[in-house]
Image: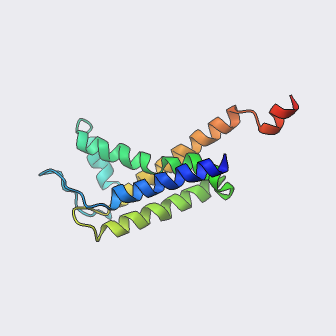
Amino acid sequence: MRLLATLVLAGSLIGGLVLTLAPAHPLPGQVVDDNLIPFHTLRLYLDNLGSMFWMRNLFGNLGLLLPLGVLGPIALPVLDRWWRLALVAFCYSATFELTQLFVPDRAADIDDVIVNVLGALLGFAIYRVVRRATPSRAHRLSG
């Protein structure tokens, strides 16, 4: 199970890296500038709930590190604490965003880091719920 979780997680993180660091080709009027002011872009999301562009960005950022939260504690048991997982998610996301400063048509945004970490923590919550709902292997073998 750990090997499978590790492989799927690695594929997910590499896929996310490719998606976020490949040059974008936005449509006119959809270019986002670099943002270092927390909650500025989140406000744009809320103000544009009907916009597919903004909703795709919001849910894409939420889902980007969700697999880290679900599979990270299985692949790396040291991530079985929410704060460790959040720290790894923060460092990973911040690295993506800082790198985007140097990629054409991409923008670094602190709100992306915030939403990525929230996505990882949502994934961790899913992991915890499933883990609690699933009888342990030792319990299944003894029963």
- x then y, percent, for residue 85: 58, 56
For the N terminus, the image quarter is: top right
Q: Is residue 111 visible?
A: no
Residue 100 position within the rendered picture, expressed as x and y whole percent measured from the top left: 32, 66
Residue extending farthest to the left is 28
Q: What x and y, as percent, mark residue 81?
A: 65, 53
| Residue drawn at the location 30% of the way across and 69% of the way down | 101
Could you say which is closer to the camera, residue 79 or residue 109? 79
Q: How is the image coloured?
A: rainbow
Residue displayed at 70% across by 33% down: 134
Residue furthest right as drawn: 142
Which residue in the rendered view is the most extreme toward the bottom?
102
Q: Quadrant of residue 59?
A: top left
26 relative position to 141: left or right: left
The residue that appears at 11% across and 52% down in the rendered structure is 28
Q: In this view of the protein, which residue sits in the foreground, 25 or 84?
A: 25
Quadrant where the C terminus is found in the figure: top right
**Residue at image point 84% right, 33% down:** 141
For the question of whether residue 22 can be seen, the reply is yes
- The image quadrant of residue 46 is top left
| Above or below, 74 relative to 97 | above
* 55, 24: nearer the viewer: 24
Q: Position of residue 133 (x, y in %)?
A: 68, 32
Relative height, residue 137 to residue 97 (above, below): above
Tell me how many marks there are. 0
